[in-house]
Amino acid sequence: MIRVGLISDTHGLLRPQAVASLQGCDFIVHGGDIGDAGILEALAAIAPLTVVRGNNDREPWADGIAETEFLKVGGVIIYAIHDLSQIDIDLAAAGVRVVISGHSHKPKIEERDGVLYVNPGSAGPRRFKLPIAVAELIVDGDSITARTIELAVT
């Protein structure tokens, strides 16, 4: 069993509750709108990190971050992109089983056409009345499960 921590839309704020929820992960994926290079350093200290650039990651520190990334976990191919509307590949042809995104700040897990789409929501500053959340993906052989984790923040 492999545990992949999912986080997105930190916008420069890495909450201690998010860090605590990601402890023990085998991998972490950040779905963009990072906001600060220090966040990547902190996450990479927890587990191997895959990260994509969000539409707000425009500072020079983010220049080397790709807009999309692939990660293979066990036999499962994960595709990370900040904004789902920017997908420009044939997911089935690429063998993708999971898409990790961000952008909307809304936690969501949905399966479409055999692909599991997971948006962990926003772990950074609260936007509107949306929850502050992260998510986790469990890969166990061919089985993939995901859940969002709402963070208790004040």
Image (cartoon, rainbow, N blue to C red):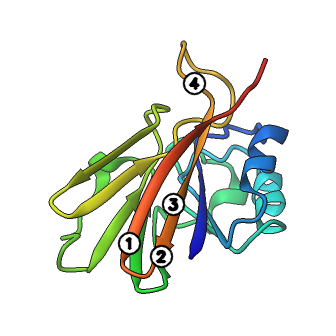
Kindly report the distance in space between the C-alpha atoms of the residues bearing marks 2 and 4. Answer: 28 Å
Mark 1 surroundings within 10 Å by alpha-carbon count, few (fewer than 14), some (14 through 19), many (20 or more)? few
Kindly report the distance in space between the C-alpha atoms of the residues bearing marks 2 and 3. Answer: 10 Å
Q: Within the image, what quadrant is residue 113 found in? A: bottom left
Q: Secondary structure at mark 1?
A: strand
Q: What amino acid is found at the position of numbered circle 2 in the picture?
A: Asp
Q: What amino acid is found at the position of numbered circle 1 in the picture?
A: Ser
Q: What amino acid is found at the position of numbered circle 4 in the picture?
A: Pro
Q: Which mark is residue 131?
A: 4
Sequence order check, earlier mark of 3 and 1: 3
The residue labelled by disc 3 is 137
Residue 15 visible somewhere in the drawing:
no
Looking at the rendering, in which quadrant would you find the N terminus? bottom right
Sequence order check, earlier mark of 1 and 4: 4
Sequence order check, earlier mark of 2 and 4: 4
Q: Which mark is residue 140?
A: 2
Mark 4 surroundings within 10 Å by alpha-carbon count, few (fewer than 14), some (14 through 19), many (20 or more)? many
The residue labelled by disc 1 is 143
Q: Secondary structure at mark 2?
A: strand
Kindly report the distance in space between the C-alpha atoms of the residues bearing marks 4 and 3. Answer: 19 Å
Kindly report the distance in space between the C-alpha atoms of the residues bearing marks 3 and 1. Answer: 10 Å
42 on left or right of 79: right
23 on left or right of 97: right
48 on left or right of 107: right
Q: What amino acid is found at the position of numbered circle 3 in the picture?
A: Leu
Residue 150 visible somewhere in the drawing:
yes
Would you place residue 17 above or below residue 53 in this image? Answer: above
Kindly report the distance in space between the C-alpha atoms of the residues bearing marks 2 and 1. Answer: 5 Å
